[in-house]
Amino acid sequence: MSDSLSPEATGLLTVNLAALVANWQSLAKRAGSAQCAAVVKADAYGIGLEQAAQALAKAGCDTFFVATFDEALRLRTILPTVTIYLLNGLNPGTAEVVCGIDVRPVLGSMAEFDEWEAHADETGEEAPAALHIDTGMNRHGFSLAEAESIAPRLVSDEITFTPTLVMSHLACADDPEHALNRQQIDAFSAIIKKFPGIPASLCNSAGLLAFPDAHFDLVRPGISLYGGRALNTGENPMQPVVKLQARVVTLREAKAGTTVGYGARLKLMRDSRLAIISAGYADGIFRAAGSSDNKKGAEAIVAGVRCNIAGRISMDLAAIDVTDVPVDKVKRGDLVTLLGDGISADDLAGHARTIGYEVLTSLGRRWKRIYTE
Ligand SMILES: *Cc1c(COP(=O)(O)O)cnc(C)c1O
């Protein structure tokens, strides 16, 4: 990324939309005969809802999942004809506005079901919606008993709204060996028999990658689209989508035996050179990813050399130990890479005891965002 483009920007977040599209295409291929939707909740996992959805729609994706009404509205504004599902369901009293922008709520409780049904009854609208059945996660979703009681009413056409999807969600798909996966797949396979003719969906990214026999009619990948790791073990087959670069504010020499940063938690073992960069925990470089005498911190790439974060990460600044970078190779104003060029969101997450999902969705609002096709 040419630095001269934005000399005033303190940090650059470059989103590779071509990689996003390539990831969706490769997932759609793996999905086989199942339809491949895209989960674009939380601002498309931090990369930008509008940009991500536009690129995916252009590539042929026509079904999207968001979490909130605001996200659904933003998506409907730019994509008038795609199918949009609202994962977090229906806030009380919102059936009319949700239906009004042609968004399908994912109904997961009897209260939501009753409100949606009442709205369809009153207006005579088709009111398409998904039904979420809980098969072992105890989060959103009808209990199996509730699903059993709803099914005959749907089949007998007593219900006036239009169910377009029956879905559930895997709790442990990132760990394919976990016994709960098979239990959930079996429970889901059994319950959908009570909803004949309605398309079924179970898999997130990890389920899509790990359980080809459980793709049903539609798969719902999120993290894999954005290049994140879905399965805990094995190679991550997806292309990285995000590159993060922060600017060097200053370089300083620091003597062996002195300490770096708040709390004086890292004592330097040698005379060192530090690059102070303009990114911190307010930008999503988690404080927990810092280093101390007992803990190695996250890494950054400076002039092609992998270096470690030195000491605690501040709100707006962090120190990088660049002692091993040739002196003439790094100067004030240069960009160092925090994500990209071999450092994944999952690598950064590992140093902060979290997951790549949280890194991407925490990137913050101060990065200058650049989208490449
Ligand atoms: C977030 C979410 C997904 C996508 O999950 P990934 O692990 O990011 O692929 C799919 N389905 C539901 C219900 C979700 O909440």
Image (cartoon, helix red, strand yellow):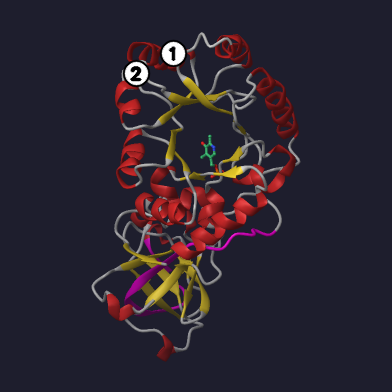
Image-quarter location of ligand 1: top right
Look at the numbered discs 2 and 1 and tell me whether their residues touch, using CB distance below 8 Å. Answer: yes
| Residue 114 located within the stretch drawn in magenta | no
Q: The disc labelled 1 sits on which kind of residue?
A: Ala
**Pointer 1: what residue?**
111
- Residue interval drawn in magenta: 235-261
Residue 46: give x, y in percent of width and height.
40, 51
Q: Position of residue 312 (x, y in %)?
A: 42, 60
In-front residue for pair 253/218: 218
Q: Looking at this view, is 234 or 146 the one in front?
A: 146
Amino acid bearing label 2: Pro
The residues tagged by marks 2 and 1 sit, at their Cα atoms, a distance apart of: 9 Å
Residue at x-position 35% and y-position 63%? 279
Q: Which residue is mark 2?
A: 92
10 Å crowding of disc 1: few (<14), some (14-19), many (20+): few
Foreground pick, 10 / 164: 164
Image check: 268 left or right of 335? right
Residue 146 pos. (x, y %): 58, 12
Residue 317: numbered disc:
none
The C terminus - image quarter: bottom left
* Res. 47 visible in picture: no
